[in-house]
Structures are given as structure tokens and as C-alpha cells.
Image: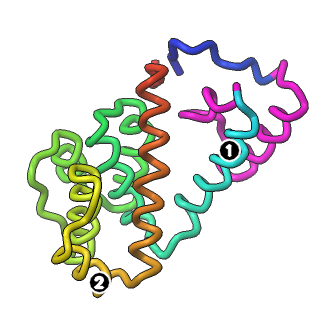
Amino acid sequence: MKSRLPLPDVDRLDPPQQAVYRSIMATRGNLSGPFLAWMHSPELASHAEKLGAFCRYQTVFERVESELLILVVAAHFRCVGEQQIHEPIAEQAGLSAGHIADIRERRPVSLASVRLTLIHALAKELLENNRIGDRLYDEGIRGLGTQGMVELVGIVGYYSLVAMTLNAFDMQMA
């Protein structure tokens, strides 16, 4: 991974960094993406790693749905690093290459289900307007439930932090 921030040498981590490193490796199996930057602040890395693990693996959303949310965030922030990491995962989860390209380029996208279309609309509106209008909010509550809406906002928020980290430090696959 390239970065304008010096990346930590995993063989020279201090004890707090080692603890975070072990936790990240246990849940993800690699130290890619924003974790390389966050390791410079082990406390931030620790909290972000736990929130990220929840947002990615433990919400009410199916994998294709959470990956859709991540790609909408990546497109909004024009975050190449996040796209490089999550586009292949999204395709494995069931999003077509065409849909992925449309999301990346912020073109209209015609998704396979009403639920995916709703999730896409909610994330886009939240990112573009910093809020969700009443009509779409009501649709979201009906379609996703209260927990789903709260977790959707959490995923969008967490991956916005990821995108800002990757963009700020110009982190992407070499």
C-alpha cells in the first residue's frame, strides 16, 4: 500500500500497537486500509477496529447490502483506496460489475431489489444532504426497521471515517 504517511513496521510495534495488531489480524486477517494509519494512534485504532468489525460483520444487513453502502461512501468521497479494497468484495457478494461501475461513477443505478434500491437512496441522501428527508426516512423505517436505520447510519459514518483517512494520507494499493 502506498501512503504519504509513514507506515508502521509490524516488526517494531510497541505493546499497545501489538495488541491492536493482534485484534485486527484475528478479525480481518490483514492490516490494510486505514489501519496502517490508525496504528500511529493505538487507542483510536482499537476503538475504530471494534466499530469496523461490527459495521462490517454484525449488523442486520446482508453482505451485499453492507458492501453497497461502503461503495456509496467510497464514491461520495472519491476514495480510490476504499474502492480498491471493497469493489472485489462487493462483486463476490453479488453486485454486478456494471452496478459497481455505476456507483463508482455516481451514475444512476438500477439495482436488483427494492431493498437494495432503498439502501442506496438512503445512503446517497444522507451523504449528499447530511440528513434524510421525511419521505425517504419513513420508507427506510418501513423497509429496514429502526435498528436497520440506525445501523445504516453507523455504517455510512464509519466508512466515511475510513474514506477520509485513506484520502487524507493518500493511501491506496500501489
Instruction: Give the secondary structure at mark 2.
Output: helix
Q: Amino acid at mark 2?
A: Gly
In-front residue for pair 92/129: 129
What percent of the width, then of the height, locates residue 109?
Answer: 13, 57
Q: Which of label 2 and label 1 is nearer to you?
A: 2
Q: Which residue is mark 1?
A: 29
Q: CA distance from mark 2 to mark 1?
A: 34 Å
In-front residue for pair 97/15: 15
Q: Residue furthest right?
A: 15
Q: Is residue 173 above or below residue 125?
A: above
> Would residue 134 be counted in the magenta stretch?
no
Q: Is residue 30 left or right of residue 154?
A: right
In-front residue for pair 172/76: 76
- Residue under the image location 35 percent in, 81 percent down: 144
Q: Which residue is mark 2?
A: 143
- Residue under the image location 17 percent in, 39 percent down: 105
Instruction: Give the secondary structure at mark 1.
Output: loop
In-front residue for pair 94/14: 14
Q: Which residues are magenta?
A: 11-40
What percent of the width, then of the height, locates residue 127?
Answer: 28, 51
In the rendered picture of this protein, how many numbered marks are placed on residues? 2
Q: Of marks 2 and 1, which one's residue comes earlier in the chain?
A: 1
> Would residue 31 be counted in the magenta stretch?
yes
What percent of the width, then of the height, locates residue 32?
Answer: 58, 33
Could you say which quadrant of the image residue 20 lies in?
Answer: top right
Q: Is residue 107 above or below residue 36?
A: below
Q: Residues within 10 Å of mark 1 (few under 14, many from 20)?
A: few
Q: Is residue 162 left or right of residue 29?
A: left
- Residue under the image location 44 percent in, 24 percent down: 168
- Residue under the image location 64 percent in, 18 percent down: 7
What percent of the width, then of the height, locates residue 5?
Answer: 57, 15
